[in-house]
Amino acid sequence: MDSEKKVRRMDQKIDEFRMRIKNSDDRDVLDNVFDSQTLMALYGLSKKGYIDALGGTVSTGKEANVFHAISNTEEIGEIAVKIYMVSTANFNAMKDYILGDPRFLGIKQSKRDIIFAWAKKEFKNLKRAEDAGVKVPKPHIVVRNILLMEFMGKDGIPMPRLKDVKLSAKDTQHIYDRVMENVAILYSGAKLIHADLSEYNILVDVDNMEPVIIDMGQSVTIDHFNAETYLKRDITNIARYFRKLGVPVTEEEMMTIIKEEAK
């Protein structure tokens, strides 16, 4: 079978499970995201039982788009399909985080190789965080520029971001305490720094009033040459947000909590 026929066949197979599209905007996103190689990779994941039906868009961005999907296996259930955009991702910004990471020494510096490494990096970071006890989406598998992970939500409705949740004073303090506990465990247990932590990439499980940390592609090991800078930036972002909500925190206090946990 020549490559053109193979691509057509893969496209047809993908259409069998991906076409629960809710509106024309979703269709536009799909047309931009699913090139033939991505379609073939998704088809391969479908054959392995990871994806049964691909649904609507959860989030979109220049670096990646996230879709809701249903797995063929009952134990996995709902999943998030994160597809990194080879055409629009900020290649130069990614290089700063990849090339300083000792886990990716010797990687080729082409745009495609960097983005594939970025997807693998987020998978590895999520796994390390999960193993250490940080509340993150459980990673399932990474293939090329596609990462499959636990869907944080229910029935296709994602958990809200921290910035979108109305919290009581008591719940605000609880969420702050739990965020700091997770950041400290991430540092001391997983030996990672999120490196882009803010109210935009913390979800809130409102049923249990627990934070979930997401978007860990840029996260770095604590021996990265910019680790301290990234940690201070994370702390500054979290302090700023929770002070706005009335929690009397200081960056110095937060840094002490994290460093004491690591001893």
Image: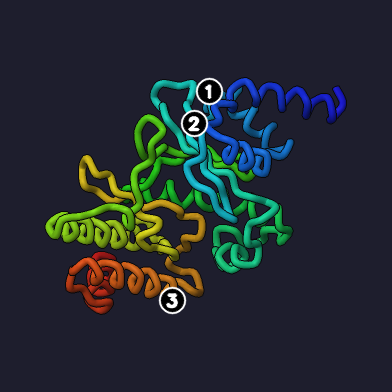
Helix, strand or loop at mark 1: loop
- What amino acid type should be assigned to the residue bearing mark 3? Thr
**3 or 1: mark nearer the eye:** 1
State the image coordinates of residue 131 (x, y, percent, origin top left): 36, 46
Q: Quadrant of the C terminus?
A: bottom left
Q: Quadrant of residue 202?
A: bottom left
- What residue appears at the point 61 percent right and 42 percent down from the top-left corner? 29
Q: Earlier in the sequence, mark 3 or mark 2?
A: 2
State the image coordinates of residue 117 (x, y, percent, origin top left): 61, 53
Can the viewer see residue 263 in this picture? no
Per the rendering, the mark at residue 52 is: 1
Q: Quote the CA–CA distance across marks 2 and 1.
A: 7 Å
- What residue appears at the point 39 percent right and 61 percent down from the top-left corner? 191
- What amino acid type should be assigned to the residue bearing mark 2? Ala
Q: Quadrant of residue 91?
A: bottom right
Give the color scheme: rainbow, by chain, secondary structure or one colour: rainbow
Q: For mark 3, does the 10 Å Cα neighbourhood hold few (<14), some (14 to 19), or many (20 or more) residues?
A: few
Q: Earlier in the sequence, mark 2 or mark 1?
A: 1
Furthest residue to the bottom?
252
Q: Quote the CA–CA distance across marks 3 and 1.
A: 42 Å
State the image coordinates of residue 19 (x, y, percent, origin top left): 59, 26
Per the rendering, the mark at residue 229 is: 3
- What residue appears at the point 35 percent right and 62 percent down from the top-left corner? 187
The residue that label 2 is drawn on is 69
